[in-house]
Image (cartoon, rainbow, N blue to C red):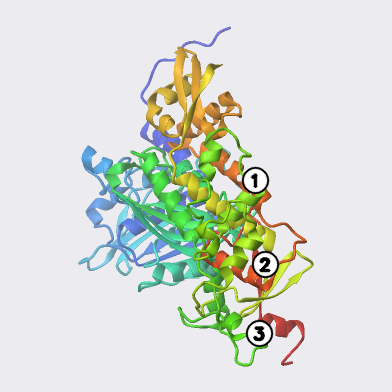
Amino acid sequence: MSQARRPILELPDELISQIAAGEVVERPASVVRELLDNALDAGATQITLRLSAGGVRLISLEDDGEGIVPEQMATALKRHATSKIASLAELEAVGTMGFRGEALAAINSIAELALLSRAAGQSNAWMLDGRTGELKPAARAGGTTVEVKELFFSVPARRKFLKTDATELAHCIEAVRRHALAHPDVGFAIWHEGKLVEQWRRQTGEDARDRRVADVLGEDFLANSIAVDHRAGAVRVTGRAGLPDAARSRADQQFAYVNGRFVRDKVIVHAARSAYEDVLHGHRQPVYVLFVELDPARVDVNVHPTKIEVRFRDGREVHQAVRHAVDQALAAPRAALLAQAATGDAPGAPAWAPREGDGESASLRAESFMPFRPPAQIPLAQAAISSGASNALTAEELRALWQPLGSPAQEGAPPQMAASDAISAGADTVAATPEWPLGRALAQLHGVYILAESRAGLIVVDMHAAHERIVYERLKAQLEGAQVASQPLLIPATFAATPQEVATAEGAADVLQRLGLDVTPFSPRTLAVRAVPATLAAGDAVELARSVLAELAQHDASTVIERAQHELLATMACHGAVRANRRLTHEEMNALLRQMEATDRSDQCNHGRPTWRQLTMRELDSLFLRGR
């Protein structure tokens, strides 16, 4: 027997609020997040969170913000009541943390809520009972306290999905941590069952953000990260990017903020990850804290009930800004900074200076080596690749790409000049400088490692990995300086495409053209690949096109072609680099060290493995128990 048709009825307000609570309030941490947003919008400088049973029994959040006048306290608990926006124009350019006006009403529908507030100029505070609506005088300093008891008491089925108290407490602490990182000028304290769990004091001054990062994520995070500060048009990216050595197996220390709001955004995550592609080993995950600042009108924060997702008006612009910001921060070699940190020298002090009475000749003690660049006479790698011959350059020609400036070999030496000849030729003709962050070569260990003495201690260099990175960066520089050559296919490669792929191919035709791809609709459900980048002509055109279209649809940008080209260059660099078990002279070893100091990303090889390590004098003394 079929059920009788039920009439269409307007739902009661309480049920509507409970449905809205299902979207906004997932667990106690969701309540904490919403209350934190309100406290920060109120201009709070100190926020105290008190919890019981992981936030299930009690969530009490106190702030010293502006407060709420008693006439508006009842209105604050109504649905869609807010002081943040009053028009569509303000919604489209919202700059506050909260704006929906749903949180307090939703929380009040599934828990026992009490609102205690004292606005500026009021002689006393007022307390509002969310259940009864009773408003009565109370004692409190300026600011607001929101007290939430017995979460989900009116919807007991939701309580069954909560985890243990310890797990819910951890989620609440994480919610506060995310806000604390973005607001160093606000102090935070978390109490659980009457015990202080976490506290981050208010920070001021130019280094306030770095000190807050150290407080929240630890001194190790700050020590193993690099400052990021980059502006591209209307987008500015600041923060800290973790060193490749600090990468983790999980992506649990990746914090991205847009105009002070913590977000999980695919565009930012993809951009940051792509900046680490050349320096991370395997499937390690980078760590970073990035703050993206742009005009609020260029980002839509009204796309998710919890406001944790955003949509950019120009995702490609943000992607490029984030990627370039992180990439530039990671590019600078860290040898000089590490040497200064190990010795306590002021910036600019030489990492190593020749000692008086050294056994070697004075010229060798004082000589140094200039940065290297590929000479004009050597054929560009891009020219060889563009012709379709991926192996056109021999290993000897690749080695010649790192010929020293000022060497006689530049005035007519053949391109096939070996690496040892190229280094030796320039070792005696370059200017002297005392700043040697990687020190001077002492010896070669088993034909694999170079041992060098620096002012800080002992440097151990993997010579093949280091030279591989140097050659790789030379090839990348040549490739980036040339336009991506496109090679038409004799027979277009067609494939059945989804509606999204067809729409992406039509909407991003100019981007595809800049990448060297020509993908056009062949029929309503078929795409044709008519041209591919010349460097990748031997690959699968359909698979390449699908990968690029997928990235464009998801991230508004694609690095598929660049990754494929770099993989090809990495293979060439690996074959062109000096091999293990090859004996190098002191001049050759020193030249390699000087090149590492002048080459971007020289701290990791193309596969993300470290190229050098340092043992400080303190660490060596500890090994031999000196001073004990």
Q: Position of residue 538 (x, y in %)?
A: 61, 29
Q: Earlier in the sequence, mark 2 or mark 1?
A: 1
**Furthest residue toward top:** 1
| Depth order, front residue of 448/245 | 448
| Depth order, front residue of 311/303 | 311
Vertical comparison of 518 with 556: above or below: above
Helix, strand or loop under label 1: loop
Q: Earlier in the sequence, mark 3 or mark 2?
A: 3
- Mark 3, mark 2: which one is toward the viewer? 3
Q: Quadrant of residue 579?
A: bottom right
- Write down the residue under mark 1: 394
Q: Amino acid at mark 2?
A: Val
The residue located at (45%, 16%) in the rendering is 521
Q: Position of residue 127 (x, y in %)?
A: 33, 58
Horizontal relation, residue 86 to residue 323: left or right: left
Horizontal relation, residue 503 to residue 360: left or right: left
Q: Amino acid at mark 3?
A: Glu
- Write down the residue under mark 2: 461
**Distance (Cα) linking label 3 and label 1:** 36 Å
**Distance (Cα) linking label 3 and label 2:** 22 Å
